[in-house]
Image (cartoon, grey):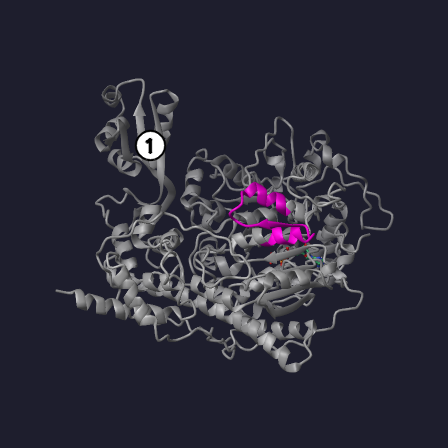
Amino acid sequence: MDADSDSDGSHISATPPRDPLPPPRLPPQPPPKPPTSYKSTASTKRSSHLDIIFKLKKPSSSKHDKIEPVPEPEPKVKPIQQPDLPSPVGNFPFQIRRPSDQPHPISIGRSLETLPAGFFSTRRASFSKICKPSLNFEPETLPEITAEPKINGSDGPGSTKTCNKKLPNLIRGDVPLPPVKLQKRSEEGNFVRLNFNGYKRKFTAKGKKMNSYSYKSKYFKRSKRRVKSEVDTGSLCDEEGLVSEIKLQSKAEKPSRCESVEAAISAVRNEVSDENLVRLLKALYGYDLFRDGQLEAIKMILAGKSTMLVLPTGAGKSLCYQIPAVVLPGITLVVSPLVALMIDQLKQLPRMIQGGLLSSSQGPEEAAETLRMVQEGSIKVLFVSPERFLNADFLSIFSTLTSVSLVVVDEAHCVSEWASLLRAKLNVECILAMTATATTTTLQSIMSALEISSTNLIQKSQVRDNLRLSVSLSSNRMKDMLKLMKSSPFLGAQSIIVYCKFQSETDVISRYLCDNNISAKSYHSGMLARDRSRIQELFCANKIRVVVATVAFGMGIDKRDVGAVIHYSLPESLEEYVQEIGRGGRDGRLSYCHLFFDDVTYYKLRSLMHSDGVDEFAVNKFLCQVFADDTSSHRKVCSLVKESASRKFDMKEEVMLTLLTHLELGETQYLHLLPQLNVTCTLNFHKTSPMLLADKDTAVAAILKKSEIKQGQYVFDIPTVANSIGVAPGDLSNHLQNLKAKGEITYELKDPAYCYKIVKVPSDFCSLTELLTRWLLDIENCKVWKLDAMYSSAVFVVDTCEKTHDCNVAQQTTCLQERILDYFKGDNNLDVLDKMGQNSPFLRADIKVFLQSNSNVKFTPRAIARIMHGIGSPAYPSSTWSRTHFWGRYIQIDFKVVMNAAKAELMNFVGKDAP
Ligand SMILES: Nc1ncnc2c1ncn2[C@@H]1O[C@H](COP(=O)(O)OP(=O)(O)OP(=O)(O)O)[C@@H](O)[C@H]1O
């Protein structure tokens, strides 16, 4: 078998190196220090600057910032591009954020509201009434299963029991199984229909019953066909030899061992011994050995103890809840921050474990179907997006189910806030919180929110010891990277991920690699989802050697044999670095991770850390607008058009959403967010005259009342009309659709907006403004500190190696690992370089000239500092402001220093101009 093949996992746990020589052992890690507080220059001090504005005319500006390519070597300062950012507000512990790919929670509420009355009223059928699925499975309905070869059970040598008719619902608690009648939809098994591989996938059962196995098989067959056809036509890859047999990494193709699994489960239920658990591991996954931390975690959970598990990326955390899930009697809920991540995890469930998913991106029918399956007990592991837990209907269903055995909080550093809600509402006995990257402070917060005892922390090194880490300072990264890839050991790596910061970089680099005979494709969030999943498939099928990606190529990618991860750009934090190198060597073999860094990129990134920052003045204006519509009726729907509000407050849309979310989920609930809508409607009447139609239709009457007539068309605001007749905006939209279907009207919708209902008007706007500003400032400072810590670590490793005159990879690995360990321990001794200039003799003079030459424009100190740092913002886009020769001129001077200088100059300016 090919050394890198993953088709048989049985040999893998022995972690053989790709190299002929065994890896040198790492020196023992120092024992974890008692938790220390997280050092941050970002402490909570608020900047005391005045937010001064000048009410002068704005320059004509185009709406959008342009993303321009970054050629190498880089010229002096260029407009800063928008990188693929993982989140609007960085990895700040306990920030409230809503993953951008998930619509708002209320949409779930909707979907649940539409379920048939009484749907959830019945409690889950008692287990005693349930009979084994083997009695209920009809062979003809499970063609794939009956086609399975006979497999030797592990009960005894030579046992040749077949495992037909028992998939996939055979794994239960210590009770008989429910009467699983395979109905059309329910047999789809791991039935994610939405956004599967980036596009909407519809299952037209057409009378054919499917289970998880058939579903997976179909998916993979289809994937193979698609990959093959793309390969054949050369549409995505132009390398030779691409048309060979494609081996997708599918656990669906692993042999089923139902009998041995059942026996192994019973054995563990009888006695939770190491031996029995290893037997179950072998039966379920084919692996021989547990990895570090897994056994400990599984035993703790099976003992009913809530556990905090910190294992490096790719160390095998999923298995730590999957095994308990099959052993414990009830359902296991997995809360995960990203829908895409949940879909991947669902796909990767061993086919013996029946999984399901509930997310806000599902339609009402799908949600109802999933919940039905949950109620009848045919789902063992249910992935749930965090905001689901805010939904009262969802909570009530689960509080009536006595069978939630375990709640898993995946990527706990992102979702801990939601999880504490869950802890409170569900009264769940056992919680498993998992993360790969969390500082001591963050861990403490998570554990206290989830009430996990400090004795139940299982924490292993943040970086797997099969990753060889190296770092170099480079003045020509492109050339140096090519050299690296053409030399050992990178030359021998079959699959490589190159991480870049900017989307345009990925294209430039992948083209450069292709020109140099290395098959590479770029991957970033600006690409169509369909193209992204094709690239991912081709990469997983080893048809592309290198994927040059932004951070978008991240969580959920489980290609086991990635032999190298190269960072072309400095990651924004050690958390990000650790996550990304964790894509390498997931099969346990050696993987090489090289980090290139340079000062120009560092300065650019540091500037970008300030691009989400907002000042008190803007927050105050924002709050005034949000609550401007204070209304006698709290049922009124308010809206904030994203684009215009973003320009008005000079605030990115994500930042506005972050603030709105805080207003909803913070200590006091001020508002209730609703699904986003296009709020401006332009309407034409066709059949009946408007007046006649208005006589019989109250909605039309309201439209006529609230519309402006522009060029013969009726233009109105959807929430305004909906409020005036006391209906929800969604209902009004449905009504318009009906009228359109009857040929009465045509209409167009535009202006996407955040919609919300006011729950409580703040009594003290000033304190709330101050609170929110401080919170945003903390986030901004924290991001800067994290970047500095990342940069300092790279410098530290290079310097240390230079000093010892014997620079080798083993040394750099140790050096960087120690640094990472210190960082995650929240070690206050971690020295973080302050490389930014604190003054410049020309700064004030330049700002003065800048103000004089733009005397008709109003600025805040932050707006000036952004221009001097070359960062575009909604009100001062780079497309306009990069033309000034001050653009990015002070990128090397600390942002706050520039902001203070701008404040001083603005005050002078006001003073002079004041009458
Ligand atoms: N004991 C084991 N022996 C061999 N392989 C294992 C073992 N445990 C897990 N694996 C494999 O390691 C890979 C990574 O596992 P998994 O996806 O659970 O990691 P993870 O810690 O959740 O990573 P991430 O943080 O990226 O989500 C998977 O392919 C999994 O099958």
- Nearest to the observer: residue 425 or residue 93: 93
Q: Is residue 573 left or right of residue 516?
A: left
- Nearest to the observer: residue 241 or residue 347: 241
At which x and y percent is residue 692?
24, 19
At which x and y percent is residue 603?
47, 67
Badge 1 crowding class, 10 Å Cα cut-off, few under 14, some 14 to 19, many 20 or more, is many
Q: Is residue 419 left or right of residue 866?
A: right
Mark yes or no: residue 532 visible.
yes
Quadrant the C terminus occupies:
bottom left
Q: Which residue is mark 1?
A: 732
Q: Is residue 529 magenta?
A: yes
Outermost residue on the top side: it is 687
Mark yes or no: residue 768 visible.
no
Q: Is residue 350 above or below residue 776?
A: above
Q: Which residues are drawn in magenta?
A: 509-536
- Picture quadrant where residue 863 is located: bottom left
Which quarter of the frame holds ligand 1? bottom right
At which x and y percent is residue 436?
58, 63
Outermost residue on the right side: it is 158
Q: Is residue 78 above or below residue 140?
A: below
Q: Is mark 1 within 8 Å of ligand 1?
A: no
Labels in figure, total: 1
The kind of residue on which mark 1 rests is Leu
Q: Is residue 663 left or right of residue 425?
A: left
Outermost residue on the left side: it is 915
Q: Is residue 788 magenta?
A: no
Q: Is residue 354 above or below residue 563?
A: above
Residue at figure coordinates x 69%, y 79% from the top left = 806
Q: Secondary structure at mark 1?
A: helix
At which x and y percent is residue 589?
73, 61
